[in-house]
Image (tube, coloured by chain):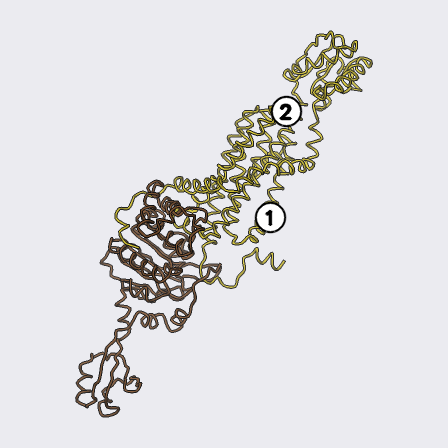
Chain colours: A yellow, B brown
Amino acid sequence: MSHGDHQIGHKGRLSMLAAAWVVARRDFTAILFSRTFFFFLLGPLFPVIVGLLAGSVGQRVDQSSAAPAIGVVMAPGDAQAMIAARGRLAARLGDGLPEMRLVKDASPAERADPGAVMVSRKGAYAGVLSGSPAAPVLSGPGPRITGWQGDVALIAAEARDGSAGSWPRVRLAKTAVPPQGDSRSRLRTAQGAQTLLFLLTMMLAGMVLSNLVEEKGNKIIEVLAAAIPMEAVFFGKLFAMLGVSLVGIAVWGGVGGALYLSAGSALALPEPAVGWPALIGLGVVYFAMAYLLLGSVFLAIGSLANTVREVQTLSMPVTMMQLMLFFFATYAMTQPGSTVEMLAVILPFSSPFAMLARAAQEPALWPHAAALGWQAVWVLLLVRGGSALFRRRAMKSGPQGQRRKWWERVVVEG
Amino acid sequence: MTGNVSGFDRPLAIEARGLVKRFEGTTAVGGVDLCVPKGAVYGILGPNGAGKTTTLRMLLGIIEPDAGYRRILGAQRPHDVAHAIGYLPEERGLYPAMKATEAIAFLGALRGLPLKEGRRRAHELLERHGLGYAADRQIRQLSKGMAQQVQILGTLVHRPRLVIFDEPFSGLDALNQGKLEAMMRGLAQDGTTVIFSTHVIAHAERLCDEVAIIAGGRVPFAGPVDVARDRIAAQVRLETRAQDGPWRAALPADSRQEGRFWHFALPNGGIEPLLRALIAGEAGILSLSIERAGLHDAFVAIAGEAAARALSTEKPEEPRR
């Protein structure tokens, strides 16, 4: 090798951001063009399966998230005729018609003010039908009952004379009552969003951990650590995987969107409180935060572990903890406004899940800004802590004495 | 500071005082002082576990010292001058799926070299060093020695002012070791400071202006190679025709006889008085040579017999974590 290679240097140290970008660019490109990314794209199949299983755990949520139904407060004969007509039509037309249930023990006050049924029955009904098949009156929140107006008219015509030839006019009585039925239904939206967020996060954090351990195996990590701060390495790795995941989400989103369009209302989830665009936007941001929080912990684990066995030993408790926090957040969303929900919002690792659920249930947006700030602080703290741990523990050389690492003692000595 | 005889009249590329590093109760480095002049080729010698790699890692900011002070190219935080430093770790590592050109450009990018310029220089370097044919091959497709050469080129692609090599000769064949030695001399000629650790003293003896000897996490000597050699007296080898006679009284008391040869340290008063006595005593001088002590002898004298034995018997280091 000759020595003519060194005439002019260049100047300028990399900023933290630029250094992180160098790492992120390399990782992003490498992962995107690897087999790993293919399996990553197949990942949603796993969440769907596990999500269905996990759904049974949130029994409480499921119980209260039944399909919205119309309570029927009519004279007994009329009520029976309406429900029977609905059954006949459903047999011919499918399940697109709203569920109708008889309000068996309606009080005189409820008969006088059918909208009160929705309050007194704790959200069992999303609307109330009164009057008669010839002159039906549908009470409930505006958007919901407007959507049902045609269906109810069809059912009333069927109930009245067994034919759908002449539809009666359905009078709408819009109520200011909070749509309890909708609120309950939104739990389903919230639960779906939470489960998706959790599974994506776990999958990505696992990938970033494998990536770091692989680099330790490649010995490249010392080159990185000598050239740029470890914080930059960690941030670069985290954001590269985030970028990869966003590409994946775009692909899945495209497929999901196509499915939605082809399946129509069959796949419809209840409208979230903040609206779909805001929920999707918040979902992406909370997904990023949940992933960055968990990923930074997993990177710290990667800095401690040298072997796959050590990775498994160390990541298992964190995974379990995250699972507990996920269930905690799921439980907390059934207790809006309670101390439990506030705790789920404050705890950094459950905060993204709890806040996403809140977005599905509550329309206010400012709490999300505060929560995102709070979570970002924790991401910074965890990355700094993880990189400090890496510097302190990972780059050892020479004799280390006879002391075992504490987790080795736990594993080996039981 | 122990045994540091480096001159302070030259500007320093590295200045370190009392660096200490402990790992889980074990002191890996117990107070290292180093002064490396700019433009020097500086060797760090020591057996395995002496603390060489840990010292280098502290100098580079990969790990933080528990105590002590360091200044690299005038900066207290090594990462502030990372763009002017090149580092080849003992445990070589590149991304196996990366092409050689990309690997070199990536290593340059980590030091602030724009990727496009890095690729251009990578092609140029590979061509110049006879590896042009491997430019588009993945690292996993290269031999270990070739991959190591690619990493060395990646260490230099951003044209650093200070290059630190940790055991650079291990893994290279004799031909490439020679090329690397020539390259290190060339770097120094161009004003680049070169520091390398090694347990092969011959490399240090051929290349270094100054050395630091590390043993047991400390530095018993740091300074010019000549000063290290001068720590022990030159050895005299005398061959005489006569086996005995009054001239023998002139020989130093610790002289050792092997046949017609006598071995002893050069007396403090020089060789001339002894020569006069030998001639007067009709010793019949057949040959006489004065051999200056080698760096290995100096190492033995400075670091101790145990360290020297370890140095001569050790195998290439394996990572111990």
Residue B121 position in % (x across, y down): 32, 45
Q: Which mark is residue B127?
A: none
Under circle 1, the secondary element is helix
Residue positioned 35% across, 64% down in the render: B45
Q: Residue B135 placed where, x, y %?
A: 37, 47
- Circle 2 chain: A
The percent position of residue A128, horizontal first and vertical second, equals 72, 16
- Position of A249 with respect to A161 (left or right) is left
- What residue is at 28 percent from the left and 82 percent from the top? B263
Identify which residue, A358 or B132, lies in the foreground.
B132
- The answer to whether any part of residue A239 appears in the image is yes
Residue depth check, mark 1 versus mark 2: number of the one nearer the observer: 2
Chain-order first, disc 1 or disc 2 = 2
Point out the residue furthest to the front here: B133
Would you name the residue on which mark 2 appears? A263
Classify residue B241 as left or right of residue A372.
left
Residue farthest to the bottom?
Answer: B245
Query: Same chain for marks 1 and 2?
Result: yes
Report if residue B57 is visible in the image: no
The residues bearing labels 1 and 2 have C-alpha atoms spaced at a distance of: 39 Å
Relative to B114, residue B288 above or below:
below
**Mark 2 surroundings within 10 Å by alpha-carbon count, few (fewer than 14), some (14 through 19), many (20 or more):** few
Q: Is B98 placed above or below B223 here?
A: above
Marks 1/2 in contact by CB < 8 Å: the verdict is no
Q: Quadrant of the N terminus of chain B?
A: bottom left
The amino acid on which the numbered mark 2 sits, given as a three-letter code, is: Ala
Residue at the spot of label 1: A316
Q: Secondary structure at mark 2?
A: helix
Q: Is residue B174 left or right of residue A249?
A: left
For disc 1, the chain is A
| Residue nearest the observer in this picture, A131 or A18 | A18
